[in-house]
Image (cartoon, rainbow, N blue to C red):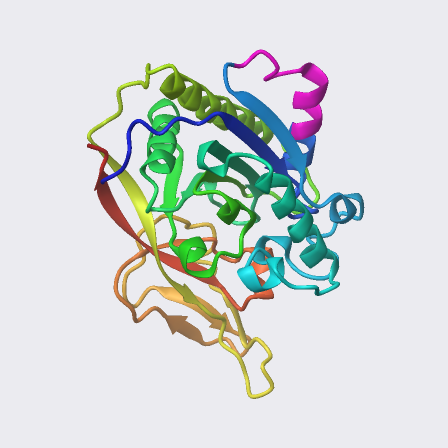
Amino acid sequence: MKGDKNQIIEKVTIVGGTHGNEYIGPYFIRKAEQAGTFQDNAIEVSTLLANPEAFAQARRFIDQDLNRSFSSDILSGTQDQHEYQRAREISRHFSQDKLSQHFIIDLHSTTANMGITLIVRNNEPLNLRAAAYVQKNMPEAHILLSDMDRVQHQSLNSISRFGIVIEVGPLPNAVLRHDLFEATEKVVELVVKFLTLSKTREEPKLPEEVTVFKFREKVPYPRGREGEPTAVVHKDLQDRDYRLLEASHPIFMTFQGDEIRYSGEPGHPVFINEAAYYLEDTAFIITDRVGVSLK
């Protein structure tokens, strides 16, 4: 893995409420602000409630998914959808800072059985090192690598080269759970600590290699002639996020009672039966489990 180990982060922004019905982020921000959690930190740490209107209504979004609204066409456009306007406001907010030294931590939850997942882009070594530090201290955490932002540049985190998305689950929409809230707090604390140590040239020792799950492809739902779903995720696949999926394993059950079995190359599914992905026709995502050098 090539990259600049001398990269210094001067500011961290913790974002919550990118999706208004994911409560961990907004309530984390509220608690951190009230407690002054990061006020004496060596790196400047700020917070941002990304979509206050959607959060107030316990909705994922008002008009469009904010986390799909940061493409160059939208940011330079004049579309009046609520999230498009909000994306431009957020982009202007960040443009006032030195983005070359700005790290974004975006807090999310998922209805899928993802446990603690750290999503990073695999073309930025600092992001992966931060995730590896978290995993070193929380071995139960998984690291998910995705090129989607680099290709599409549509998520909030794509504003900066440096950042990490924290996904925890399973958690129903508009619900808080103590254990997952506590886990989120610990992950954020570790990321901020790692970046602070790096700034003071005390970056902690990391393993030579880290195990990650690399995005391969989306698997859609079976659909009929009118576009309606004709099957549900099979009970033998449900909740098996990160477990090896091999050919012939049942993945769907049709409403007529027929099993549909997996016929692709072996892989590790994630975001299985995620509620929000019904709108995106994604039943789950296949990843490859690989080792990545941190040297």
Q: Quadrant of the C terminus?
A: top left
- The residue at 58%/11% (across/down) is 40
Q: Position of residue 132 (x, y in %)?
A: 33, 31
- The residue at 28%/33% (across/down) is 4
Q: Nearer the viewer, residue 95 or 278?
A: 95
Res. 213 in view = yes
Q: Which residue occupies the extreme top position in the image?
A: 40
Query: How many numbered circles are shown?
Result: 0
Q: Nearer the viewer, residue 241 or 249?
A: 241
**Residue extent of the magenta highlight:** 29-41
Specify the quadrant of the image occupied by residue 124.
Answer: top left
- The residue at 53%/41% (across/down) is 169
Side (left or right) of 284 relative to 133: right
Taking the magenta stretch, the answer to whether it contains residue 33 is yes
Q: Position of residue 182 (x, y in %)?
A: 57, 25
Q: Nearer the viewer, residue 15 or 199?
A: 199
Q: Quadrant of the N terminus?
A: top left
Side (left or right) of 287 relative to 55: left
Taking the magenta stretch, the answer to whether it contains residue 175 is no
Q: Position of residue 70 (x, y in %)?
A: 57, 55
Res. 178 in view = no
Q: Position of residue 90 (x, y in %)?
A: 65, 45
- The residue at 55%/25% (across/down) is 185
Q: Is residue 23 above or below residue 242?
A: above
